[in-house]
Image (spheres, rainbow, N blue to C red):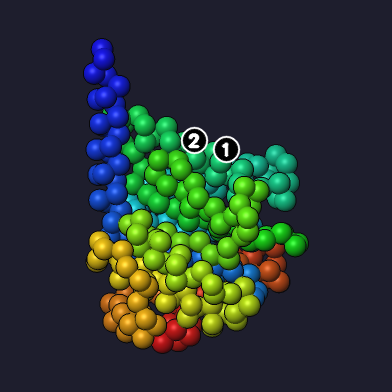
């Protein structure tokens, strides 16, 4: 009997190691504020990675496509039910993540005889009126990381995910000190693309070091552009309709960063 808690902890550690190994090669995703709203950006080879969830909430995901789709549909269902039962303005990213998505992911991760979710998610919420934009990372074990708020000193104007923790730190280090909220869409795309390159370069090197110089980031980005598709979407503050989410055409986004 005394061995049971140890076996559970050991099983959880093995489970975490397995999931991290599966997520490791995933293409990074960058979301940041810009002058007219929020931009989401990534490079992909085979499948869509950026999605609309609700009127002012978007999602980027890396991991197993089936698990990302299950979580995307769950997020849409929760947000839609909340909006129908109350009002669209009552749907918030914090409630969606903290009270619905996080507990479900935690339960799946800790039930060692069932399959976990092989996914890491990045949510972005366009702030209403004068509220700041919110970026939230949701992991396979239910843990969350936000860009600030009630329990932080200040908000950051970005959120990132990648397959390895040090790659995410590299992207965050690159973006800190920048001021994307003042950027035009073209400027924001170039900044997001450089941050993506910083994270992608870090995936091939387990040593954590300084962020590469901008010329190295640009060279790596152009090398990767030859074999991948650009996927980008925006949520616009002054969208002409209630739906703020808009996918950018691949050619349009590629032309701005090339």
Q: Position of residue 172 (x, y in %)?
A: 46, 65
For residue 226, say whether it is visible. no
Q: Quadrant of the N terminus?
A: top left
Q: Position of 173 compared to 91: left or right?
A: left
Who's the residue at 63% across and 55% down the image? 153
Q: Residues within 10 Å of mark 2 (few under 14, many from 20)?
A: some
Q: Residues within 10 Å of mark 1 (few under 14, many from 20)?
A: few
Quick one: SS at disc 1? helix
Q: Position of residue 77 (x, y in %)?
A: 55, 44
Q: Position of 13 compared to 49: left or right?
A: left
Q: Position of 192 compared to 202: left or right?
A: right
Give the residue number, with chain letter if any, for mark 1.
99
Farthest residue toward the right? Answer: 129
Who's the residue at 64% across and 65% down the image? 244
Above or below, 239 against 53 in this view is: below
Q: Position of residue 96 (x, y in %)?
A: 58, 44
Who's the residue at 59% across and 69% down the image? 33
Locate residue 105: give its quadrant.
top left
28 vs 45, nearest the viewer: 28
Give the residue number, with chain letter if any, for mark 2.
103
Q: Position of residue 215 (x, y in %)?
A: 36, 86
For residue 156, say whether it is visible. yes
The CA distance from mark 1 to mark 2 is 7 Å
Please say if the residues under marks 1 and 2 sit with CB atoms less than 8 Å apart.
Answer: yes
The circle drawn on residue 216 is none
Who's the residue at 39% across and 44% down the image? 140
Above or below, 141 against 20 in this view is: above
Locate residue 147: give its quadrant.
bottom right
Quick one: SS at disc 2? helix
Image label count: 2
Q: Quadrant of the C terminus?
A: bottom left
């Amino acid at each position: 009997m005394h061995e049971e808690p140890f076996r559970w902890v050991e099983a959880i550690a093995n489970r975490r190691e397995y999931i991290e190994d599966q997520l490791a090669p995933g293409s990074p995703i960058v979301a940041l504020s810009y002058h007219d709203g929020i931009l989401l950006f990534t490079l992909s080879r085979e499948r869509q990675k950026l999605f609309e969830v609700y009127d002012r909430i978007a999602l980027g995901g890396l991991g197993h496509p089936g698990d990302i789709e299950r979580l995307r549909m769950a997020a849409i269902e929760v947000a839609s039910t909340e909006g129908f039962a109350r009002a669209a303005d009552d749907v918030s990213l914090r409630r969606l993540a903290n009270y619905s998505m996080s507990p479900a992911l935690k339960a799946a991760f800790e039930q060692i005889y069932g399959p976990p979710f092989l996914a890491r998610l990045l949510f972005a919420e366009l702030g209403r009126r004068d509220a700041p934009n919110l970026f939230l990372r949701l992991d396979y074990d239910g843990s969350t990381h936000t860009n600030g708020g009630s329990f932080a000193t200040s908000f950051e104007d970005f959120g990132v995910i990648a397959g390895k923790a040090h790659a995410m730190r590299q992207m965050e280090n690159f973006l800190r000190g920048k001021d994307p909220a003042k950027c035009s869409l073209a400027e924001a795309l170039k900044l997001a693309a450089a941050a993506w390159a910083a994270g992608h370069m870090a995936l091939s090197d387990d040593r954590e070091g300084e962020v590469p110089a901008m010329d190295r980031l640009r060279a790596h980005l152009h090398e990767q552009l030859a074999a991948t598709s650009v996927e980008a979407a925006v949520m616009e503050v002054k969208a002409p309709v209630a739906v703020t989410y808009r996918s950018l055409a691949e050619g349009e986004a590629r032309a701005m960063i090339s």
